[in-house]
Image (tube, rainbow, N blue to C red):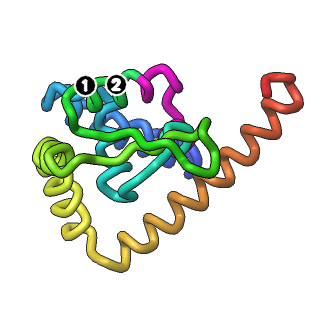
Amino acid sequence: MKISETEKLNLSIIHGSRAYSQWEQDHDLPDYLVVIMYELLIRGKLTQRELVNLSDLPKQSINKGIKILRDHDHITMTVDPSDKRVRFCQFTEAGRKYAYDKLRPLFELEEKTAQAMGTDKMKLLAKLSEEWSTTFWHFLSEERSKNGKL
């Protein structure tokens, strides 16, 4: 049985996703904490809404992760002076160190993988993955809109 290129891509995405899930399980970290820490390490400061939109995780999961990190003094919450409804999440100095220490093994694994693939392949992979994701979400949104799910 021949597998189409679309099916190969889908299986590859699922397989890669399971690898990240396995890493999270091996390091006793729930996906929502990994996503929050990863995004805040990269971007520095995000609103709760931005974290939800970037992660595609349920709002409840993101809020749970924020509460855990805040309760351990790893992040601070600040109100946007121009819109009191908006709250920004940002690492404390100790929180940044905590997150980096927790995610360092993942960063090392990603870097080792990237080096094995080489710069040109990584640039192409990033570009095509982003394009695929954006296009897929576009068509999914159209479908959901037609079916009254938006």
Q: Is residue 114 left or right of residue 127?
A: left
In percent of width and height, residue 7 lies at: 54, 42
Picture quadrant of residue 25: top left
What SS does tag 2 mark? helix
- Residue 1 appearing in the image: no
Q: Where is 104 relative to 142, above or below?
A: below
Where's the C terminus, which quadrant?
A: top right
| Label pair 1/2, CB-CB below 8 angstroms | yes
Q: Which residues are magenta?
A: 52-63
**Residue located 66% across and 47% down the image:** 136
Gap in angstroms between the C-alphas marked 1 and 2: 6 Å
Residue that lies at the very extreme toward the bottom in this rendered image: 120
**Residue located 37% across and 49% down the image:** 39
- Magenta-drawn stretch contains 48: no
What SS does tag 1 mark? helix
In percent of width and height, residue 134 lies at: 64, 54
Which residue corresponds to mark 1? 71
In percent of width and height, residue 95 lies at: 19, 44
Q: Which amino acid, by three-letter code, is at mark 1?
A: Asp
Residue 36's label in the rendered image is none
The secondary structure that dominates the magenta segment is helix
Which residue corresponds to mark 2? 67
Of residue 63 and residue 19, the one placed in the foreground of this image is: 63
**Residue located 14% across and 29% down the image:** 26
Of residue 65 and residue 115, the one placed in the foreground of this image is: 65
Q: Which amino acid, by three-letter code, is at mark 2?
A: Lys
Label 1 crowding class (10 Å Cα cut-off): few <14, some 14-19, many 20+? few
Of residue 86 and residue 141, the one placed in the foreground of this image is: 86
